[in-house]
Amino acid sequence: MTALGMPPFPPRGSGNLRGAVTFPAAAHEELANTQLRRNIGKATHTIRAKRLSVTGELPDWEQLRDTGAAVKTDVLNRLPELLIQFEAAVTARGGVVHWAADAAEANSLVAELVRATGSDEVIKVKSMATQEIGLNEHLEEQGIATYETDLAELIVQLGHDKPSHILVPAIHRNRAEIREIFLREMPGVDPDLDDNPRHLAAAARKFLRHKFMTVPVAVSGANFGIADTGTLAVVESEGNGRMCLTLPQTLITVMGIEKLLPTYRDLEVFLQLLPRSSTGERMNPYTSMWTGVTPGDGPQEFHLVLLDNGRTAALADEVGREALHCIRCSACLNVCPVYERTGGHAYGSTYPGPIGAVLSPQLAGMDAPGDPNATLPFASSLCGACYDACPVKIDIPSLLVELRHQKVEHASFGIEAAAMKAASLAMSSSRRWTAAQKAAGLGRLLAGKKGKITSLPGPLAGWTEARDIPAPPKQTFRQWWNSDEGRAALAQAREKGRQQ
């Protein structure tokens, strides 16, 4: 029982987990951006084709998916036990473990740890968890400059933008736009810089190299944490992660509590699943692993912030907890027809696409009146492509349906509920159903000569914004059945049956 005045338990997450407007409103605006649609369409088609190629090479791909799903289920079933084991292993190897209940606590912890080093700068490895909690914004408010070292994240940061994809945060930008951002925002850039991808990468490398060599504090995320050894792992493709994880004196890692694997051997499965599902590669170009502190080698001070931020609330949902299996590969985004047309910004949250439509409402909630998160479970065609692509077999369509059910259960009586109530009343009696069918025939007046209803009035207008509705038939089935035409057709069918 929750005492009056006490916050609900488990607490919901905070930070960048909720948009300012509903998904339909945001999507309507994004659909007008033809450049964004071209950029995203081209990128997702390329990644999709590569993924299909490399997963098709493995005869045991489905068995790997089954194993990955089983390992993640085991983790969630034993999460408290594994977290305690993990903390003990990290501490035994010279690391310091901190626990953060929400975004505010995590941000405060990281800022305090950075200030303790005397530095007012940090370099960062791409991390969804720090995007989720809004760490960059918080550190800047505290007078601490942050430098994203992943090329795509750097583009987003310099462009004062937001990520629109889990794996490729700047997927909505083309190279001409990137050139303009670099010329406008990057200190010391060559004013004659063109939009050749190699030249753009070289400009970013030159800018970042000085930071790698001089900034004493790094902040990272973690793809995996190994409970029995205290090892953490980051996979990336540019080498910036390797620089951040080895050069600074102090390393601060922010990791969601669900990222655990029980044993070191479990990495074998996930280091096959993740690269093939994310970038369509057989293996990651850079896989970095570290365990605590090693004297004279790498960072000499290591802090691990274990982040809840709504994950315990998601874990408490016996159905929805499956979303915590996610390994952030982005395979579901690359096959989703909705994401391909709207992009990631329409979802409002750090986590876009199908998995975001499930994960964001669970982490941050969706029950408040007018909550934009309440529209995310409906941002799907339920085509099932996301489930087919997911390397750990998260049944995203079923989770979306469950969240829709939860939303309807908590919703106040509105237009949709009134329509369902009216339909239930009409269908509960044959006499009322016949009367309703006859009344529906009046819709032919709206259809006109073309035989299609192209515009409905008032609150029903949404049904015809993107579709036409066929005009109701002249006769109901019962009317046809009892007509001379119906009786003649029935007699003809019987005669044909006797002849056969």
Image (cartoon, grey):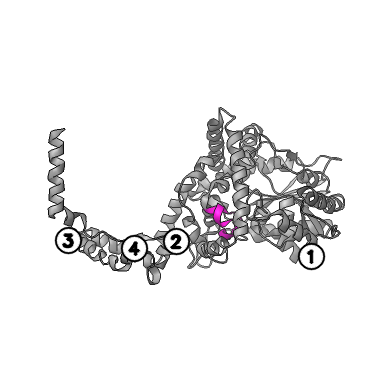
Q: Residue lying farthest bottom?
A: 458
Relative horizontal placement of residue 193, taking residue 352 as reference (left or right): right
Rendered-image quadrant of the C terminus: top left
Q: Residues within 10 Å of mark 3 (few under 14, many from 20)?
A: few
Question: What is the spatial separation of the Cα atoms under label 3 and label 4, in whole angstroms?
Answer: 31 Å
Q: Residues within 10 Å of mark 4 (few under 14, many from 20)?
A: few
- Residue beneath disc 3: 431
Q: Secondary structure at mark 4?
A: helix
- Kindly indicate the quadrant of the structure image that contains residue 74: top right
- Three-letter code, disc 2: Ala
Nearest to the eye among marks 3 and 4: give it.
4
Question: What is the spatial separation of the Cα atoms under label 3 and label 2, in whole angstroms?
Answer: 34 Å
Question: What is the spatial separation of the Cα atoms under label 1 and label 3, in whole angstroms?
Answer: 73 Å
Q: At x 82% / y 52%, what residue is drawn? A: 203
- Residue beneath disc 2: 466
Instruction: Give the residues drawn in magenta, as a range.
Output: 338-352
Q: At x 18% / y 58%, what residue is drawn? A: 430
Residue 450, numbered circle: 4
Relative horizontal placement of residue 242, taking residue 413 as reference (left or right): right
- Three-letter code, disc 4: Lys
Residue 43 image offset from top left, x and y in percent = 63, 48
Task: Answer whether labels 1 and 2 touch (C-beta < 8 Å).
Answer: no
- Residue beneath disc 1: 143
Nearest to the eye among marks 1 and 2: give it.
2
